[in-house]
Amino acid sequence: MLDRPIDKLLFSAGEWRFDTLKRTYDAIEEVAIGEMGLDPYPNQIELISSEQMLDAYSSNGVPIIYNHWSFGKRFATDEKMYRKGYSGLAYEIVINSNPCISYIMEENTMTMQALVMAHAAFGHNHFFKNNYLFREQTDAAGILDYLKFAKDYVARCEEKYGFPAVERVLDAAHALMEQGVNRYGRRPRASFSEEQARAEARIEHQRETFSDLWRTLPPPSKVQSPPPEAINALNETLGLPEENLLYFLEKFSPSLKDWERELLRITRNIAQYFYPQRQTKMMNEGCATYVHYKIMNRLYERGQIDEGTMMEFLASHSSVVFQPEFDDRRYSGINPYALGFAMMCDIERVTLDPTEEDREYLPEIAGNGDVMGTLKNAWANFRDDSFIAQYLSPRLIREMRLFKLSDKAEASDYRVAAIHDDRGYTEVRRALARQYDPALLSPNLQVTGADLTRDRRLTLTHWLNDRVPLAQRDAQAVLAHVADLWGYDVELKGVGPDDEELYSYEASPGV
């Protein structure tokens, strides 16, 4: 056991004080930036109570959000589970903003405060600032201002148009949030100030160009069917097919009012803000867990924390990266912390002490000796699926005992399709990467037709993956929301291989 002078320790008791927090934060920053070379946003650390943490849960972790009943429902559910002891609370919540805001709980011990500052304020923070998805699709400097604008705008709409009218639009928009993002960055991201200027310009343009044409159109029976070339030209003008349902409804719905369109725009901007987090959950948590592990160990090596602190830290860390076996009652899939941390540590091993197998499978990083350079490059330029496809090593596949099962609907049994051999490693890596592919996690739904010249019927197409249809009850419920926003009949077609139509649902707007 090392002899550690008391005066060198950052803290020696479980209770925290503000001066202790500041001293510990400075030491963590010195290791994170000075030694590891991390590049985070400026940090803002906020101490909150357990009830405030529950409140942050209910609003997806953002500090400012508009009012909606779903947030209160989630708060009530989480609070009940927490009070009864059925679930715990996160030690922290971190927000992708500039400055980066990290919420840490008052109830944490000083050891846990050190851990979560290293984890959130430097691990997650560095990832948010440097990963390409966050750089391309989010505006960290403007998100807090935009959330305040959204909250104020919704409040004004509630006062002017009534709670039921606003709730109807937000309910429909929330049901479509997963289909309200630009998955491939087709449209350039605007800053908050640009968004606000555009909103004002749109409102002014609509005032100047208002037309009563929609109301005066003859009924469908008196309108002749347009030729196919006219329909194709209209679809091209509308930008069809369109994957972003909220964008299409905001721009082209014949029935929405100006303020309702702005509510859709607010919802899809917030959905876009969260979209990179869904694509990088495993990498983000793996990065933050690796960073806090290295920082806490480095503080111990420097004599700034004692053995008791390390024992408490390691107990918590081990719980975070614990992976239950498939037959364990606690198993619910692969723990993103466990897989992410294991892959970061494995990359460190491959760069410093590679085997011949590593040199064959990972020749671009094997033995390069640059651990942090390799990791920072991966954190900046990959998302979960591509990271696994690039860096999952055969050794880690064996250590985590991963293999591939084939499950076909027409077969009565599972079949082991890939094991631990040369061919199997490639198959396992490819299969695991597919499980994190955002194109396969969410249904491929697109707007493919809008008959604005006759009955204004909207057509959506679901391109099935492996012939798996949408759940009928959920699909029809969400389709009703689409019809409500569109204002006319909506049809959803499920299309399989060779453009074979496998199912279809229809919905009409509510009264």
Image (tube, grey):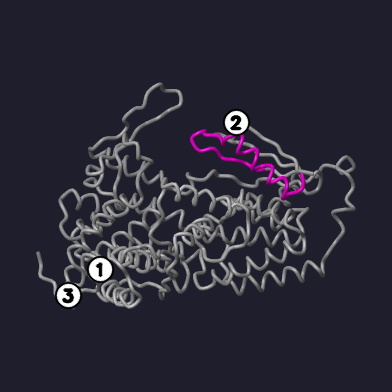
Residue 228 position, x and y percent, is: 75, 43
Separation of marks 1 and 2 at Cα, in angstroms? 65 Å
Q: Identify which amino acid the numbered label 1 is placed on.
A: Ala
Q: Is 81 placed left or right of 241 in the picture?
A: left
Say if mark 1 contacts mark 3, CB within 8 Å: no
Mark toward the start of the polypeptide (3 vs 2): 3
Mark carried by residue 502: 2
Element on which disc 2 rests: strand
Q: Which residue is mark 3?
A: 6
* Residue at image location 24% in from the left, 65% down from the top: 296
Up-down: is 226 above or below 343?
Answer: above
Q: Identify which amino acid the numbered label 3 is placed on.
A: Ile
| Magenta residue span | 460-488
The answer to whether residue 92 is magenta is no
Q: Which residue is mark 1?
A: 13
Q: Residues within 10 Å of mark 3 (few under 14, many from 20)?
A: few
The answer to whether residue 473 is magenta is yes
Residue 374 position, x and y percent, is: 27, 63
Q: In which quarter of the view is residue 499 placed?
A: top right
Q: In which quarter of the view is residue 413 placed?
A: top left
Mark toward the start of the polypeptide (1 vs 2): 1
Q: Identify which amino acid the numbered label 2 is placed on.
A: Leu
